[in-house]
Image (tube, grey):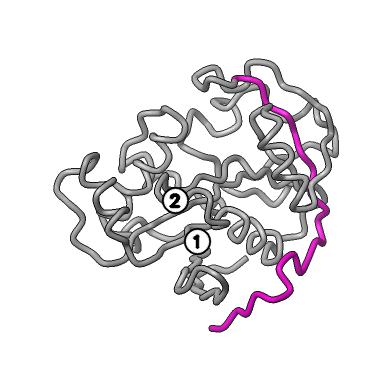
Amino acid sequence: MVKNQKTLKIHQKIPDIILALFQKIPGSKLNAQDLRVLTTILNDSWKTNITPETMKQRLNSGSLFIIAKDLATDKDLKYLKQRLAPPINSPTIPVGIIETIDSKTGGNYNKVPKNYSALTKKGLWKPQTSKSDTLILVDATILSTRKGKNLGRKMMAYTLKNITKPHKYLWTYTPNIEKVKRWHESLGAKNTNHIIKQARPEFIYSDVNIMSYPVQQRNLYKDTKISH
């Protein structure tokens, strides 16, 4: 991981996707519009009520967040105009986010917090710790207008390739949905079949199924060119 913002471009089917790796980045590094769009992405998908201030607290926690930004399309702007005021005034917007959190489990699934609130400190997030041995990929969330375009796969591939902190375990906090579990399996994850009941009581699919990724996984997209 890095102490400062690191920006990379991925040249593949979707041009000009910027993946920004954040660790202890002050909220001022993201403008107010970015925070509002990020909250919209999360609230629309998870039926939550996150505020821009809460989003800022999360990003300031020291945990790892992967945020994809891209030039806004007409479809993006129309969608966001219905949800945000004032309207978007920047050509580049967040289009996806992966949220992670550190934990110490010793490889024991039963030590993963039993609900989303405990895992994430009531949604405010926990800082990284030197004693953690497990990185939990909490959520991968895409702007509604960008779903079905492989952005989530690219962001996950980037995450798996660029995690450098020596965690022994790399797990997900995945809703127990067959389609979602198969998606993770297609990226190299193993289904542990460990179910946490009612882990996300606010979500329509409240049970969580932990998926496990190989820690040293690399080159999921061998044709992806990354340039500084």
Q: Is residue 81 above or below residue 113?
A: below
Q: Is residue 124 above or below residue 214?
A: above
Q: Which span is picked out in magenta?
A: 206-228
Give left or right: position of 74 versus 215.
left
Mark 1 and mark 2: Cα distance apart in space = 8 Å
Please identify the residue farthest to the bottom as the structure is shown: 228
Which picture quadrant has residue 218?
Answer: bottom right
Q: Residue at x 50, y 68 (%)?
A: 14
Percent position (x, y) of residue 107?
85, 38
Check disc 2: other Cα within 10 Å, few if <14, some if 14-19, many if 20+: many
Secondary structure beneath label 2:
helix
Q: Main secondary structure of the magenta part?
A: loop
Q: Residue at x 51, y 39 (%)?
A: 125
Give left or right: position of 12 versus 76.
right
Secondary structure beneath label 1:
strand
Which picture quadrant has residue 108?
Answer: top right
> Does the magenta-highlighted stretch encompass residue 223?
yes
Point out the tag, 1 or 2, that comes first from the N-terminus. Answer: 1
In this orientation, which residue lies closer to the viewer: 96 or 117?
Answer: 96
Residue that numbered label 1 is attached to = 22
Q: Are marks 1 and 2 in contact (CB under 8 Å)?
A: yes
Quadrant of the frame with the N terminus: bottom right
Residue that numbered label 2 is attached to = 59
In this orientation, which residue lies closer to the viewer: 95 or 65?
Answer: 95
Percent position (x, y) of residue 122?
49, 28
Check disc 1: other Cα within 10 Å, few if <14, some if 14-19, many if 20+: many
Q: Residue at x 42, y 27 (%)?
A: 47
Percent position (x, y) of residue 166?
77, 59
Residue 128: assigned label? none
Amino acid type, mark 1 = Phe
> Does the magenta-highlighted stretch encompass residue 87?
no
